[in-house]
Structures are given as C-alpha cells and as structure tokens.
C-alpha cells in the first residue's frame, strides 16, 4: 500500500507544471514565514528541494538574511546538519544531484530549533512517506526537541499513512492552502 501511494503521489507531483510548482511554493513560503514557530526560530534547517518538491531555494535565500540556516549534507548514508552562509556555494551531490555544501560546517543538533522536512505524502497525524532511504527518520531521532514541519502541496496530505516503528512524525504540515497542527 505504501509503495502504491508513493508511486501515485510522485506521478501526480511530477506532472505539475513548473509555474504551478513555483506559485504554490510561494504561497507555502508565505504560510511558513507567518508562523510564530518560524519567526522565533534562530536556527532553521531546510531541505534543499529538487525536481518537483516544494521549492525551498528562495526560502533559504531569504532566511539567510536573518537566521542561521542549516541544510543536510549526506555523509556515510546519514544526514549531517551543516550551516550555510551563501546558497550559491551549494553543489550537486550524490546520485540525485541534490545541492549540498562542499564541506560540512557543523552545528550541534540541540541548536536547531526548527526542521523543515520533505515528503512524498503526509497524513494529518504527521506521519510521512519519504523516498525510502530512512535518512530523515534516523536524523530526526537525534533532534527530539526540535519542532518539525513537513512542507508539501495540499494534495500530498492523505487520510492515513501506514506507519512503522522507526517513523518519526512531524509536528505540523504547511501547504499552499493550510497549516495542519499534527499534535491536536
């Protein structure tokens, strides 16, 4: 069931025109930047979007002006949080060519207050389907106190996602249409 949902969701997301992705991403950015959790966070960890994901590139560039911005660097199949100073210094890396820092500028996990999490699908309880490598679930276990927000397009929010023991849910989901508090 998880694989079927993953495939159909990716197919739907990949069929979105670039302009629609851009427009919806701008609305998601507005919704995120209006949240108190975002406004009060000093250090924010973004995922660096690729393909048809919610575009985080502009969000990262704008956040660099007022916050400590952290992005993932994958080292030995694990996410290493890395502070960045300039978005333009990120380079394509790994088999997917996702932008990453060349060298990790480490930050203690306890100093990251807000983590933005990618996903292929989310349910209203904050459970998600990722790409299947477990990088985020492993990483999120290391930052239990950080507030976790899933960013996705509204159609990616489904009724129920089958969960597994190692899954770490997000606290909130932000789409172009709504903000869902998963802890209610």
Image (spheres, rainbow, N blue to C red):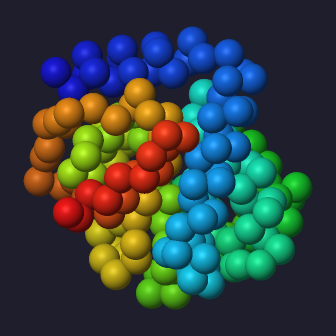
Q: Quadrant of the N terminus?
A: top left
Q: Nearer the viewer, residue 91 or 51?
A: 51
| Rendering coords of residue 149 (x, y %) | 43, 59
Q: Is residue 129 left or right of residue 114?
A: left
Could you tell me which residue is drawn at 74 percent across and 68 percent down?
A: 63
Q: Quadrant of the C terminus?
A: bottom left
Q: Nearer the viewer, residue 134 or 156?
A: 156
| Rendering coords of residue 81 (x, y %) | 56, 70
Q: Nearer the viewer, residue 29 or 103?
A: 29
Report if residue 98 is visible in the image: no
| Rendering coords of residue 83 (x, y %) | 68, 74
Q: Tell me: residue 126, above or below residue 36.
A: above
Q: Tell me: residue 65, above or below residue 78.
A: below
Could you tell me which residue is drawn at 37 percent across and 40 percent down?
A: 130
Report if residue 163 is visible in the image: yes
Q: Which of the 4 image quadrants contains residue 67?
A: bottom right
């Amino acid at each position: 069931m998880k694989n079927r949902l993953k495939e159909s969701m990716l197919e739907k997301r990949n069929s979105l025109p670039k302009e629609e992705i851009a427009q919806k991403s701008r609305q998601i950015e507005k919704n995120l930047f209006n949240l108190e959790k975002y406004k009060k966070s000093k250090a924010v960890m973004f995922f660096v979007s690729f393909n048809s994901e919610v575009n985080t590139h502009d969000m990262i560039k704008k956040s660099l002006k007022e916050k400590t911005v952290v992005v993932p660097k994958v080292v030995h199949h694990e996410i290493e949080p890395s502070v960045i100073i300039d978005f333009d210094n990120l380079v394509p890396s790994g088999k997917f060519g996702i932008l990453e820092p060349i060298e990790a500028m480490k930050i203690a996990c306890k100093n990251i207050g807000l983590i933005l999490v990618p996903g292929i699908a989310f349910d209203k309880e904050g459970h998600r389907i990722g790409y299947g490598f477990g990088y985020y679930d492993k990483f999120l276990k290391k930052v239990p106190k950080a507030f976790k927000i899933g960013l996705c397009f509204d159609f990616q929010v489904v009724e129920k996602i089958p969960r597994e023991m190692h899954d770490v849910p997000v606290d909130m989901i932000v789409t172009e249409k709504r903000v869902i508090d998963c802890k209610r």
